[in-house]
Amino acid sequence: MKHTISVLVENHSGVLSRISGLFSRRGFNIESLAVGPTQDPEVSRVTIIADGNEYTVEQIEKQLNKLIEVIKVKTLKTGECLARELLLVKVAAGADKRQEIMTICEIANAKVIDLTLNTMTLEVCDKYDHLKRFEQLIAPYGIIEMVRTGTIAIQKGSEVFAHKKQI
């Protein structure tokens, strides 16, 4: 089962290396890893998608909490968080195929961000499953290059996952 783990860390060099090293040493598999700043420039948020059972997630949380730079760790439950990732894909798109690709983009809420005589570069931000479906729909046109971000997630509702009291 996939788990979304949100980690607030001090924004110092080497923190990501220590987190990934922890996973490596313990044999935990990271499916997705995204790091970005928070509203506080001294704090970053690491979003980890890891595969495993409840015991594995409990062990991951315990090990993360042992790292000095880790401020807070929380496993976000599937129905209680909003998760998205970004997909950029360059497809072969001669003049005869552009309208078909545009129709798929319209349905999938994707944007054309670059266009040449022979290619289209598309951008779509959505849930993992929707991106996989979009990838399958666009694949027959010829994917030339593709890149995806890691998943980022935030808790639903008014509860805040932060290191300081929020107003």
Image (spheres, rainbow, N blue to C red):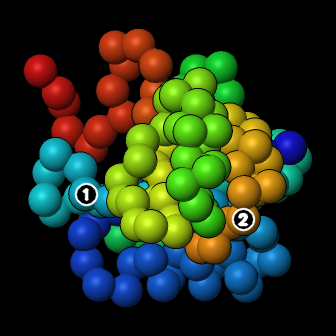
Q: Amino acid at mark 2?
A: Gly
Question: In this rendering, would 44 be left or right of 149?
Answer: left
For image coordinates 20% across by 39% down, the residue present is 164
For image coordinates 62% across by 51% down, the residue present is 96
For image coordinates 58% across by 59% down, the residue present is 93
For image coordinates 47% across by 59% down, the residue present is 121
Q: Amino acid at mark 1?
A: Pro
Q: Quadrant of residue 117?
A: bottom left
How far apart are the alpha carbons under marks 2 and 1?
Answer: 35 Å
Q: Residue furthest front?
A: 96
Residue of label 1 = 37
Helix, strand or loop at mark 1: strand
Residue 109, placed above or below residue 24: above
The quarter of the image holding the C terminus is top left
Frontmost residue, 100 versus 67: 100
Residue of label 2 = 142
Helix, strand or loop at mark 2: loop
Question: In this rendering, would 166 be left or right of 89?
Answer: left
- Badge 2: few (under 14), some or many (20 or more) residues near its Cα, within 10 Å? few
Q: How many marks?
A: 2
- Badge 1: few (under 14), some or many (20 or more) residues near its Cα, within 10 Å? some
Answer yes or no: is residue 48 visible: no
Question: In this rendering, would 40 be left or right of 97?
Answer: left
Mark 2 or mark 1: name the one nearer the start of the chain.
1
Q: Position of residue 53 (x, y in %)?
A: 87, 47
Q: Position of residue 25 (x, y in %)?
A: 73, 85
